[in-house]
Image: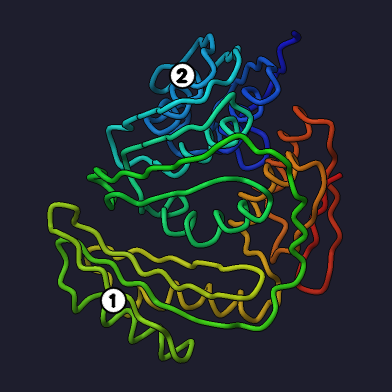
Amino acid sequence: MECLELDGSRGEGGGQILRTALSLSMITGTPFAIERIRAGRKKPGLLRQHLTAVQAAAAVCGAEVEGAVAGSQQLRFTPGPVRGGDYRHAIGSAGSSTLVLQTVLPALWFADGPSTLRVSGGTHNPAAPPADFLIRSWQPLLRRMGVTLDIQLLRHGFYPAGGGEVLAATAPVAAWQPLRLNTRGDLRRQAAVGVVAGVPAEVAKREMQRAAGQLGVLDEELRVLPSNEGPGNVLMLVLDYPEVSEVFTAFGERGVPAEVVADRAAREARLFRASGAPVGEYLADQLLLPMALAGQGSLTTTVLSSHLRTNCEVIEAFLPVRFSFEPLEQQVRVSVA
């Protein structure tokens, strides 16, 4: 089969180009070669989490791989058949375990049997979707599309220590159901989840109190973790609608007051609430590939980001689908067919 040539510097030039290519190469059996990996990032090339994603993908399909070394900006990936089974991978840093999950899981939906995938590393860091986002926002929508999926957060892992672990159980998809997510309904519930590890609980309490002052009444969930799971602090604001749940996240930093952390998350939540769109910027990115695998569908989101456009281009290179974009008032509708 002809090898697909990809340019990793396209668009925002991030790791999503590689991750989407790995997923679709495994699913379609199409080999690919990519150059200028993550050329748009401060530290270009393969970091630990990207190497782990490549290694995890290779294990699932018995791929032949060239260039899978730290810092490499070139990679060649020739997949074999996807096999179900029990897989376990360790990033060895605070690199995102959730992004590794999202790389490999789509291929396992086309495997020859059920699978489990356990990844250790970072579960809550600023550069990737936190595990709670996958569990509360992404997973319910995939289940609606016919995907069997159960993601569990076994241990929190914060930057820079890592040490967290997530476990996903999945199975081949029997029949895909198109996702059409263009309305969200009325807000049913707002919640604040404050998490601390090796940080005083009072910090999370102040964050949640501040967020409530900006968003209104919030159901509060305080997680005080063992100090050996930290240090770390994260505030997650959850907005539940009939059609979708969104999660907005801000991370505590040394020297940054709890109120400033809360303001960051609350601002994003307020903007989303006011937009009327059912899908936020980051969730939209993460729904593109499942929508394309279903062969049709649409969603309405808040912004047409460069990241989203680039992801669409990579998907179109592997699959016989096309994305279209319809500007709306303060929103954009993304459709695939």
Q: Which of the two discs, 1 and 2, labels the residue nearer the N terminus?
A: 2
Name the residue: 35% across, 76% down. Answer: 260
- Badge 1 crowding class, 10 Å Cα cut-off, few under 14, some 14 to 19, many 20 or more, is many
Query: What quarter of the picture does the N terminus occupy?
Result: top right
Give 175 or 178, whichever is nearer the viewer. 175
Q: Position of residue 293 (x, y in %)?
A: 73, 39
* Left or right: residue 200 compared with residue 302: left
Identify which amino acid the numbered label 2 is placed on: Ala
Question: Disc 1 marks which amino acid?
Answer: Ala
Quadrant assignment for the C terminus: top right
Label placed on residue 59:
2
Query: Residue visible at 77% across and 59% down?
Result: 180
Q: Position of residue 283 (x, y in %)?
A: 60, 57
Image side of residue 45 versus residue 187, left or right: left
> x, y (%) of residue 229?
19, 53
Above-or-below relation of 219 to 231:
below
Specify how the rendered protein is coloured.
rainbow
| Residue 258, numbered label | 1
Q: Secondary structure at mark 1?
A: helix
Relative to 10, residue 76 above or below: above
Q: Nearer the viewer, residue 311 or 59?
A: 59
Vertical placement of residue 289 versus 268, above or below:
above
Tell me residue 56's x, y (percent): 45, 25
Q: Residue at x 36, y 72 (%)?
A: 193
User: Which image quarter: residue 161?
Assistant: top left
Give me the residue at 45% from left, 73% from top: 237
Whole-number angstrom distance, CA of label 1 to CA of label 2: 42 Å
Mark 1 vs mark 2: in front = 2
Task: Find residue 314 and report its image quarter.
Answer: top right
Q: Residues within 10 Å of mark 2 (few under 14, many from 20)?
A: some
